[in-house]
Image (cartoon, rainbow, N blue to C red):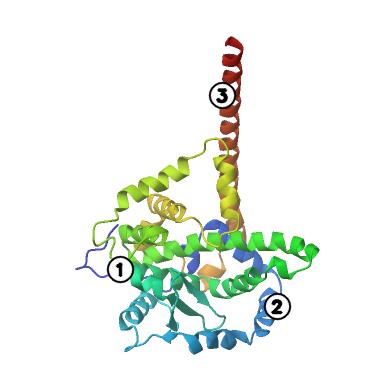
């Protein structure tokens, strides 16, 4: 669904992040939040770095904080997105100089957002709206605190640790990465809700995958073949392709951009996007708190069960094809 320029975007009064969160993301976060005292422990870890203010000072000292006269368009878009999500506090937004395309949401009590200059250079105004709404999604969902912890954990180099300590940390790191990837899928949905233009949201993934300044405007990028590429990636399961896909993904904080495009398309096709636009979503407060925890685990279990069956089926099919090919080759060798 694309919102015409003449029609205002739909606002979502009191929307709770659970409305758009990916089931695996929700279950992971709910599990962490259900552990007594977990948040207190996390805050103590962050306090070692000087707390939220210590992290914020890094960007205050070496980035540009947006405002009415500083990156005014980006700042105005952030205010609009915060209004769309009915969020009571507009986060601070910093622009930091780096050639690497990225953005992030960090902090605890008062999360803030960081945009890289590389993103500003290649995105148009509406694509930037999707990106900012994506980061606001992290804020509304309460991801900022856990993403900050994830950055700390992932910054620990295995080479700086004793061998056994590195082995012990590996499962934790892999678990954090898995949650991080699923959290990105949640925030992608928030990015679409903030923009309400499916095509623009998909264009963002295309540009993150390989965009350049003005390429889309110059007609050098086309969304249709990119989506075809995304579907081709999903359907490429010959031989050891499935294994390679898993290994290529394990160390990533974000899913592959083609996967993100396909996941978002499936969410739209499934009808949840339209339901939220029509006002069917979970409100903050009592409605969100009363949501049974079992629903989160049930949805996540179904998701992973389907994913596991899919992978197992593809591996089995690949094995059968390999065995068949080997048998045929052996028969040909005998005949010759």
Number of numbered labels in the structure image = 3
**In front: label 1 or label 2:** 1
Circle 1 residue? 126
Q: Nearer the viewer, residue 169 or 176?
A: 169
The structure residue drawn at horizontal position 65% and vertical position 70%, both measured from the top left corner, is 153
The picture places residue 303, in percent across and down from the top left corner, at: 56, 49
The picture places residue 86, in percent across and down from the top left corner, at: 40, 76
Direction from residue 126 to residue 20 in the image, left or right:
right
Q: Nearer the viewer, residue 45 or 276?
A: 45
User: Mark 3 or mark 2: which comes first in sequence?
Assistant: 2
The structure residue drawn at horizontal position 41% and vertical position 56%, both measured from the top left corner, is 272
Q: Is residue 232 visible?
A: yes
User: Mark 1 or mark 3: which comes first in sequence?
Assistant: 1
Numbered label attached to residue 325: 3
The quarter of the image holding the N terminus is bottom left
Residue at the outermost top position = 335
Numbered label attached to residue 41: 2
Secondary structure under the numbered disc 3 in the rendered image: helix
The quarter of the image holding the C terminus is top right
Alpha-carbon distance for marks 1 and 3?
A: 50 Å
Sort mark 1 into few (<14), some (14-19) or many (20+) by Cα contacts within 10 Å. some
Alpha-carbon distance for marks 1 and 2?
A: 39 Å
Asked if 155 appears above or below 319 in the picture, the reply is: below
**CB-based contact (under 8 Å), mark 3 and mark 2:** no
Q: Is residue 89 visible?
A: no
**CB-based contact (under 8 Å), mark 1 and mark 2:** no
Alpha-carbon distance for marks 3 and 2?
A: 55 Å
Q: Give residue 312's quadrant in the image.
A: top right
């Amino acid at each position: 669904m694309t919102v015409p320029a003449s029609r205002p975007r739909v606002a979502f009064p009191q929307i709770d992040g659970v409305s758009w969160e990916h089931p695996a993301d929700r279950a992971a976060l709910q599990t962490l939040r259900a552990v007594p005292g977990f948040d207190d422990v996390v805050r103590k870890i962050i306090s070692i770095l000087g707390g939220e203010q210590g992290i914020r000072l890094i960007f205050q000292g070496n980035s540009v904080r947006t405002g009415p006269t500083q990156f005014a368009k980006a700042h105005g878009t952030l205010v609009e997105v915060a209004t769309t999500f009915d969020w009571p506090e507009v986060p601070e937004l910093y622009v930091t100089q780096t050639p690497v395309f990225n953005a992030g949401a960090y902090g605890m009590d008062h999360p803030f957002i960081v945009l890289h200059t590389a993103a500003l250079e290649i995105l148009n105004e509406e694509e930037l709206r999707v990106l900012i709404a994506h980061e606001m999604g992290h804020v509304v969902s309460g991801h900022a605190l856990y993403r900050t912890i994830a950055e700390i954990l992932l910054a620990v180099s295995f080479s700086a640790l004793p061998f056994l300590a590195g082995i012990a940390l590996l499962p934790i790191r892999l678990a954090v990465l898995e949650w991080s990837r699923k959290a990105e899928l949640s925030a992608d949905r928030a990015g679409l809700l903030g923009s309400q233009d499916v095509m623009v949201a998909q264009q963002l993934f295309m540009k993150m995958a390989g965009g350049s300044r003005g390429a889309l405007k110059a007609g050098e990028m086309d969304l249709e073949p990119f989506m075809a590429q995304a579907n081709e990636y999903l359907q490429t399961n010959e031989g050891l392709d499935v294994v390679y896909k898993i290994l290529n993904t394990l160390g990533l904080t974000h899913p592959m951009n083609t996967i993100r495009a396909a996941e978002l398309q499936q969410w739209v096709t499934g009808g949840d996007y339209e339901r939220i636009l029509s006002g069917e979503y979970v409100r903050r407060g009592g409605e969100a708190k009363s949501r049974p925890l079992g629903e989160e685990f049930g949805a996540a279990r179904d998701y992973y069960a389907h994913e596991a069956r899919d992978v197992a089926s593809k591996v089995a099919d690949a094995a059968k094809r390999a065995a068949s090919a080997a048998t045929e080759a052996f028969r040909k060798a005998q005949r010759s």
